[in-house]
Amino acid sequence: MMDLSQAKIRFNRSEESLLKKIGAIADKLNLETYLIGGYVRDKLLKRACMDIDIVCVGDAIKLSKEVAVIYNLPPPTIFKRFGTAMIKAGEFEVEFVGARKESYNKDSRKPIVQNGSLEDDQNRRDFTINALAFSLNKVSWGKMLDPFRGIEDLKNGVIRTPLSPKVTFTDDPLRMLRAIRFASQLKFDISLETLNGIKECADRIEIISQERITTELNKIILSDKPSIGFKLLHEVGLIEKIFPAMARLRGVDYVNGKGHKDNYFHTLQVLDNVAYKSNDLWLRWAAIMHDIGKPKTKRFNNKIGWTFHGHDAVGAGMTPSIFRKLKLPLDHKMKFVQKLVRLHLRPISLTKENITDSAIRRLLYEAGEDIDQLMMLCEADITTKNEGKQKRYLANYELVKEKMNEIEEKDHIRNWQPPISGEEIMDVFNIGPSREVGIIKNAIKEAILDGDIANSYKEAHSFMLNKAKEMGII
Ligand code: CTP
């Protein structure tokens, strides 16, 4: 629980001078003006925040223009459709909006905006903790208008809608995801009524664009303990609507009394483990995706029980279409996730056999510069509660890592390219681009990875000549 007994906001000097100036300009224009929303919330929670939202009862665009002039800034960017204006003042982005009543069209996010009082404006906001207004006018500087007991909710760590949840969520269904995102980011609880409201309105999420959904999903993933958000997404029935492939991981099947682990909760444990070590969004995505191929590959075998053979390759195969659907990038970030999904079982298999140099070289070659991230994922994948096993598995990975360091020092495979290129092969044998060139190039790479020849130009060259002879090229 936060101690907000004083509920006082402490501004640093540059913030205070900016806000006081805005207040003075508002006084001059005779506009009742407040600091509102996320900035007030984050200041009270002592979290960093650079986006300042200002609401005034009246013409916000006029206010923003005047602030820009006094501050000698370029004119504000005006978003006519929303009646808002934005200026960049040093490190801050300040958004100005006139207090408004807003009601939404049932089937779209497009609001019908009408001017309103501060109270109207607070009513239409998403959560009590985001509806706090801090007065900027000189006579009332610092007065906090908190009609929904948002400060108490901040103290108690509660997310609650100011109006009935049904009204707030129907106005903008994305708020259901925002509630869960704030719960995950701030480690807050969602009030029971608000949680029930989300369950009731979950279907409405379908009118929200995938981009906005994915922005919230990524914020959940980037929170310190993302499982908080994903458990809530499951509890309210949103996960199957926004990310069905992940929802399919949920559940345990039994045959002859034998069950497998619930792969949804296992995945969340892996995700939390990775999140504890790294803030990299894409490594976290790799944790989410690592077992995504399990539902498709699940089989029961009377002798060995449940198997998920090939779930690594199947999961890697599913990665591009899932990224496309979620409007995630399809560039090297997707390729990175796909690679980790494809390789996530390889280090385990190395610990099960006698580790050969060639197996290590192959893994180093395939993982390339992502090897450390891959090992981080593999370690995070150890979720057994049995301490003995946990220690043994980690020790095995230490051994693999030691071996990798030795081989890397010796052979420099990590960012390695085979010493003979396709062009050179074509030149030497005077042939054009063909299947043969690929066969020879691959054979050289395999021979080096297997340790049959050294990783040197000389040995690769004579190997190439022999291979060409064998193929009848020379
Ligand atoms: N808001 C809302 N409904 C939304 C989005 C925003 O009522 N769907 C209101 C809230 O009062 C919110 C403010 O607009 O505090 C600013 O929104 P935004 O900048 O998107 O979020 P923040 O609350 O500032 O939080 P964050 O920056 O973490 O997204």
Image (spheres, rainbow, N blue to C red):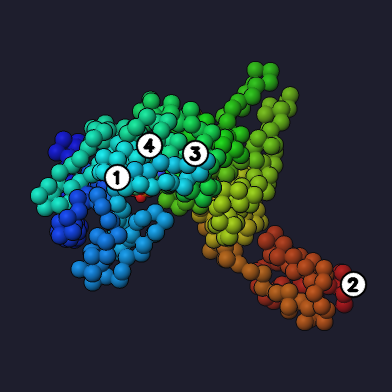
Going by the numbered disc 4, the residue's amino acid type is Ala
Q: Nearer the viewer, residue 409 or 330?
A: 330
Q: How far apart are the two marked residues, 3 and 1, measured between alpha carbons?
A: 21 Å
N-terminal of the two: label 3 or label 1?
Answer: 3
Residue situated furthest right in the rendering = 472
The residue that label 4 is drawn on is: 183
The residue that label 3 is drawn on is: 106
Local packing at callout 2 (Cα closer than 10 Å; few below 14, some 14-19, many 20+) is few
Going by the numbered disc 1, the residue's amino acid type is Gly
Local packing at callout 3 (Cα closer than 10 Å; few below 14, some 14-19, many 20+) is few
The residue that label 2 is drawn on is: 472
Going by the numbered disc 3, the residue's amino acid type is Lys
The location of residue 52, given as percent across then percent down, is 28, 54
Viewer-nearest of discs 1 and 2? 1
The location of residue 369, given as percent across then percent down, is 54, 61
Quick check: is the Cβ at mark 2 less than 8 Å away from ligand 1?
A: no
Q: Nearer the viewer, residue 124 or 466?
A: 124
The residue that label 1 is drawn on is: 116
The local secondary structure at tag 2 comes to loop
Q: Are marks 1 and 2 in contact (CB under 8 Å)?
A: no
Viewer-nearest of discs 4 and 3? 3
Q: How far apart are the two marked residues, 1 and 2, measured between alpha carbons?
A: 85 Å
